[in-house]
Image: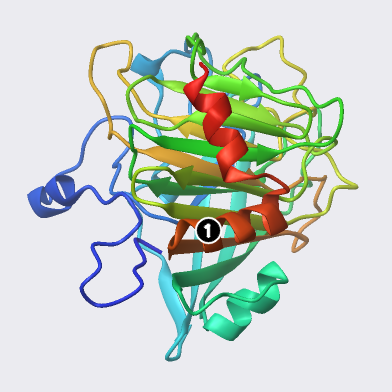
């Protein structure tokens, strides 16, 4: 899903790299075309990472998105008015030089207003514009070799790229006692990260590279954002098996590989070499993983909703979904 809109005249909610698409050229590290529901595979880095060649230093210079999730086309299996099914097969190696042979299947569906209301367990007021879609994703082991923790596992990783805003903030509802993971990059979180007992806010202006994460022990199966300038509420929900392990994608060999996050928020900014991929921000969710025999699969469902319009009505939705009042959040933000 590249981008979505509420009507034919709407510019769309997703960040789209029109310049790169029109150039018909490839770029180093990643072809950042954009997309509100991008299929990736983890772990990104660490001792079992798949974005670095074996024995390479894990720095931005050596970081490379695998071709199967960057430049290779998916096969269209089936289509209808509101849904499309896609598939792809690929081979690649991880940092331990273990070769994976995988099958990917994606079913993407655009939701009606009635389905959006049902998915969010609320009534969508007629004063609000809304759009929603969902992707159901599976990752299958096609190799005769069983996936084993000693040589590394894989997980499904869905990333939504959205337009940044100077008054945009990510919303992460948390369980009591939650700890926010800020170990991904060397980032300055001053005036950008606000933590309360039940929700964490992270500024998504595309001006400072950083990433935060939340453990599956501390999440509430929802993450989102609110743009206080354009009054846009974005909601992402997800379903995965929390009985299994979650892979760690930190750029750190000492990080425990099977104690990873279920969700992440990424804010774009300048890289080590001064370049910038966007700017954009991302709301990301990850499936759990497990040791798979041939033809066994893991599953992950990721749904995205955008609502815009009357602030009062959006606040009602925010309270229902996130358990947070936008006026209270704005006071916290203005106090930073």
Question: Split into 4 quadrants, where in the image is the N terminus?
Answer: bottom left
**Residue occupying image coordinates x 52% and y 34%:** 330
Task: From this view, report whether residue 247 is shown above or below residue 123.
Answer: above
Between 82 and 41, the one lying in front of the other is 82
Which residue is farthest bottom? Answer: 81
Task: From this view, report whether residue 113 is shown above or below residue 203.
Answer: below
The answer to whether residue 97 is seen in the rendering is no
Which residue is farthest right? Answer: 243
Question: Where residue 318 sits in the image (x, y, percent)?
Answer: 62, 53
**Residue occupying image coordinates x 68% and y 44%:** 324
**Residue occupying image coordinates x 43% and y 32%:** 204
In the picture, residue 144 is in which quadrant?
Answer: bottom right
> In this figure, which colouring scheme has been used for the structure?
rainbow
In the picture, residue 286 is in which quadrant?
Answer: top right
> Circle 1 is placed at which residue position?
312
In the picture, residue 173 is in which quadrant?
Answer: top right
Instruction: Tell me: 329 left or right of 257.
Output: left
Instruction: Tell me: 157 left or right of 266.
Output: right
Between 201 and 154, the one lying in front of the other is 201
Which residue is farthest left? Answer: 23
Question: Where residue 59 sits in the image (x, y, percent)?
Answer: 43, 13
Question: Where residue 281 sits in the image (x, y, percent)?
Answer: 41, 37
Question: Where residue 178 sits in the image (x, y, percent)?
Answer: 81, 27
Task: From this view, report whether residue 331 is shown above or below residue 127.
Answer: above
The answer to whether residue 316 is seen in the rendering is yes
**Residue occupying image coordinates x 65% and y 26%:** 48
Query: Would you call the spot at circle 1 few (<14 residues within 10 Å), some (14-19), or many (20 or more)?
Result: few
């Amino acid at each position: 899903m590249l981008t979505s809109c509420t009507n034919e005249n709407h510019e769309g909610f997703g960040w789209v790299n029109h310049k790169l698409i029109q150039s018909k050229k490839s770029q180093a590290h990643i072809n950042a075309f954009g997309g509100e529901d991008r299929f990736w595979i983890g772990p990104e880095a660490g001792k079992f990472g798949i974005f670095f060649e074996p024995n390479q230093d894990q720095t931005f210079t050596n970081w490379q998105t695998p071709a199967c999730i960057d430049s290779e086309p998916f096969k269209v299996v089936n289509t209808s008015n509101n849904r499309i099914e896609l598939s792809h097969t690929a081979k690649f190696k991880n940092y331990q030089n273990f070769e994976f042979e995988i099958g990917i299947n994606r079913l993407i569906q655009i939701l009606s207003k009635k389905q959006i209301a049902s998915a969010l367990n609320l009534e969508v007021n007629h004063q609000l514009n809304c759009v929603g879609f969902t992707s159901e994703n599976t990752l299958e082991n096609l190799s005769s070799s069983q996936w084993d923790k000693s040589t590394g596992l894989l997980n499904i990783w869905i990333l939504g790229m959205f337009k940044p805003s100077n008054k945009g903030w990510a919303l992460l509802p948390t369980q009591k006692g939650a700890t926010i993971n800020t170990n991904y990059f060397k980032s300055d979180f001053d005036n950008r990260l606000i933590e309360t007992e039940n929700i964490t806010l992270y500024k998504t202006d595309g001006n400072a590279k950083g990433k935060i994460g939340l453990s599956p022990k501390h999440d509430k199966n929802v993450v989102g954002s609110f743009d206080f300038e354009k009054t846009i509420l974005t909601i992402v929900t997800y379903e995965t098996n929390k009985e299994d392990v979650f892979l760690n994608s930190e750029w750190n060999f000492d990080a425990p590989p099977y104690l990873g996050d279920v969700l992440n928020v990424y804010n774009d900014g300048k890289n080590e070499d001064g370049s910038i991929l966007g700017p954009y921000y991302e709301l990301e969710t990850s499936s759990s993983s497990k040791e798979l025999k041939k033809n066994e699969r893991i599953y992950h469902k990721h749904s995205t909703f955008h609502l815009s319009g009357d602030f009062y009505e959006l606040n009602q939705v925010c309270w229902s979904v996130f358990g947070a009042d936008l006026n209270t959040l704005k006071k916290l933000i203005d106090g930073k």
